[in-house]
Image (cartoon, helix red, strand yellow):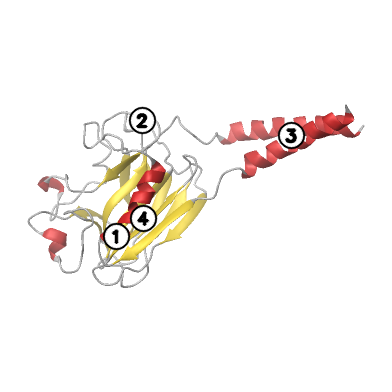
């Protein structure tokens, strides 16, 4: 009986360790090259890791991913007009993707290139991954990404990962992604690779559960780098949500009490 109790005690200790350290390390995806073919395999691997592509409907799905390639953005909110950061957090099919962009630092807004003025007037500088529109910041080089329930557009939710395509990362600081949880804690950071002039790059991270609440993007060069496809895990509030701090405290208190009790039984 004493050996059995010892095993139970050790199991309880292991349980506490697992609950505090059991998450797998984030998986990074990085690629850069002269054309779309040079990053395609990495982009596809990132997509496959997140799961199937979900329809852009105002509904929540279990698992999978959503994407933005900018090409369906109407002329009314394309260059030279401003692009609203909440455009893809809409309540209608097509715009319902559960994602918003907030200017930070010196960034004052966003723009999406137009068909009449491809690549913001610099088609020889900026290459597209999925023809033919691109996305850029205005005034600065940083912004935040936040996630909302596609079903109601107001409930803050989480995602399992995010990745983006960028072009012409050959000047200044390389782009970075910083991933934060719902409590504002930094979970992970990732720096992209240089693409060379007119090149394309991809950078993204996938977590084993939906823990990401906000992503801070620094593109590194407000004038010389723009973005193409955004790919992200289905925004969710029900699947793999991290417990509230009070729930975590109760869980660990209970586990500690169980461990202490069983350990006393094992060694008495």
Q: Is residue 33 visible?
A: yes
How far apart are the two marked residues, 2 and 4, measured between alpha carbons?
Answer: 24 Å
Q: Residues within 10 Å of mark 1 (few under 14, many from 20)?
A: many
For residue 267, what is the image quadrant? Answer: top right
Question: At 35% across and 46% down in the image, what residue appears?
Answer: 47
Q: Position of residue 147 (x, y in %)?
A: 37, 40
SS for dot 1: strand
Question: Is residue 177 placed above or below 252 in the rendered structure?
Answer: below
How far apart are the two marked residues, 1 and 3, measured between alpha carbons?
Answer: 47 Å
Q: Which mark is residue 61?
A: 2
- Horizontal side, residue 255 vs residue 170: left or right: right
Q: Which mark is residue 166?
A: 1
Q: Earlier in the sequence, mark 3 or mark 2?
A: 3
Q: Position of residue 154 (x, y in %)?
A: 34, 33
Residue labelled with disc 3: 12
How far apart are the two marked residues, 3 and 2, measured between alpha carbons?
Answer: 35 Å
How far apart are the two marked residues, 4 and 1, measured between alpha carbons?
Answer: 13 Å
Question: Is residue 97 placed above or below 225 in the rendered structure?
Answer: above
Q: Earlier in the sequence, mark 2 or mark 1?
A: 2
Name the residue at the right extreme. Answer: 268
Q: Position of residue 245 (x, y in %)?
A: 58, 36
Residue labelled with disc 4: 42
């Amino acid at each position: 009986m004493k050996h059995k109790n010892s095993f139970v005690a050790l199991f309880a200790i292991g349980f506490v360790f697992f609950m505090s350290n059991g998450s797998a390390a984030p998986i990074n995806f990085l690629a850069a090259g002269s054309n779309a073919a040079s990053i395609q395999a990495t982009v596809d691997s990132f997509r496959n890791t997140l799961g199937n592509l979900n329809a852009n409907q105002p509904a929540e799905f279990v698992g999978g991913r959503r994407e933005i390639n900018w090409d369906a953005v109407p002329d009314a909110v394309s260059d030279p007009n401003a692009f609203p950061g909440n455009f893809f957090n809409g309540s209608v099919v097509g715009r319902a993707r559960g994602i918003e962009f907030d200017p930070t630092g010196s960034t004052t807004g966003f723009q999406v290139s137009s068909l009449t003025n491809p690549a913001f007037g610099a088609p020889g500088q900026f290459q597209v991954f999925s023809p033919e529109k691109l996305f850029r910041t205005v005034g600065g080089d940083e912004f935040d990404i936040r996630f909302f329930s596609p079903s109601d557009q107001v409930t803050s939710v989480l995602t399992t990962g995010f990745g983006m395509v960028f072009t012409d990362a050959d000047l200044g600081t390389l782009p970075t992604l910083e991933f934060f949880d719902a409590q504002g804690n930094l979970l992970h950071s990732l720096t992209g690779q240089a693409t060379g002039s007119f090149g394309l790059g991809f950078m993204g991270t996938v977590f084993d559960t939906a823990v990401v609440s906000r992503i801070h993007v620094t593109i590194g060069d407000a004038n010389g780098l723009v973005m193409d496809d955004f790919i992200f895990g289905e925004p969710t509030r029900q699947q793999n949500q991290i417990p509230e701090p009070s729930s975590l405290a109760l869980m660990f208190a209970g586990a500690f009490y169980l461990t202490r009790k069983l350990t006393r039984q094992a060694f008495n």
